[in-house]
Image: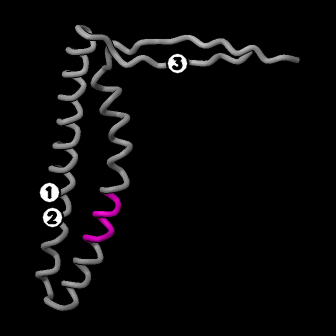
């Protein structure tokens, strides 16, 4: 049998903020996990050397995660709004899709 390939182009003119935030939050998992592992080892190391001072690292981890996540998601929401503004005026991203039957 012969496969017929049909190509069509679609233009993305609008993105929704919740879908972008959901997609970009997947990219936050790896840095936050690495930051958490580093913080736990750092806190244990300081706990052994300095005593209770080592526990200071755990709240720093929580504050860091909240600030990093809020900053990253806020910037992505702003980028989405700017994309929607300019895509409506100048055109959006054009993608070529190939259908195989």
Q: Find numbered disc 2 in the image and state the secondary structure of the residue it sits on.
A: helix
The answer to whether 64 is drawn above or below residue 83 in the figure is below
Nearer the observer: mark 3 or 2; the answer is 3
Q: Earlier in the sequence, mark 3 or mark 2?
A: 2
30 and 79: which one is in front?
79
Which residue matches tag 2?
59
Identity of the residue furthest to the bottom in this view: 49
Q: Find numbered disc 3 in the image and state the secondary structure of the residue it sits on.
A: strand
Cα distance, mark 2 to mark 1?
A: 6 Å
6 and 27: which one is in front?
6
Which residue matches tag 1?
63
Q: Position of residue 84 (x, y in %)?
A: 25, 16
Q: Which mark is residue 41?
A: none
Image-based side of 14 in relation to 76, left or right: right
| Residue visible at 31% across and 20% down in the picture | 16
Q: Position of residue 99 (x, y in %)?
A: 65, 16
Q: Which residues are magenta?
A: 32-39
Q: Which mark is residue 96?
A: 3
Count residues near mark 3 (Cα–Cα under 10 Å), then give few for <14, some for 14-19, many for 20+.
few
The answer to whether 57 is drawn above or below residue 80 in the figure is below
Q: Position of residue 7 (x, y in %)?
A: 60, 13
Does the magenta portion include 35? Answer: yes
Does the magenta portion include 78? Answer: no
| Residue visible at 17% across and 57% down in the picture | 64
In contact (CB < 8 Å): disc 2 and disc 1: yes
Q: Find numbered disc 1 in the image and state the secondary structure of the residue it sits on.
A: helix
Where residue 26 sits, quadrant-wise, is top left
Q: Position of residue 30 (x, y in %)?
A: 37, 55
Count residues near mark 1 (Cα–Cα under 10 Å), then give few for <14, some for 14-19, many for 20+.
few
């Amino acid at each position: 049998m012969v496969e017929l390939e049909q190509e069509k182009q679609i233009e993305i003119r609008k993105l929704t903020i919740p879908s972008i935030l959901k997609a970009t939050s997947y990219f936050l998992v790896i840095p936050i996990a690495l930051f958490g592992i580093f913080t736990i080892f750092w806190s244990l190391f300081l706990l052994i050397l300095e005593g209770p001072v080592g526990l200071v690292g755990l709240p720093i981890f929580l504050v860091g995660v909240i600030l990093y996540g809020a900053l990253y998601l806020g910037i992505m929401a702003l980028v989405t709004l700017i994309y929607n503004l300019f895509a409506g005026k100048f055109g959006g991203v054009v993608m070529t899709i190939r259908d195989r039957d």
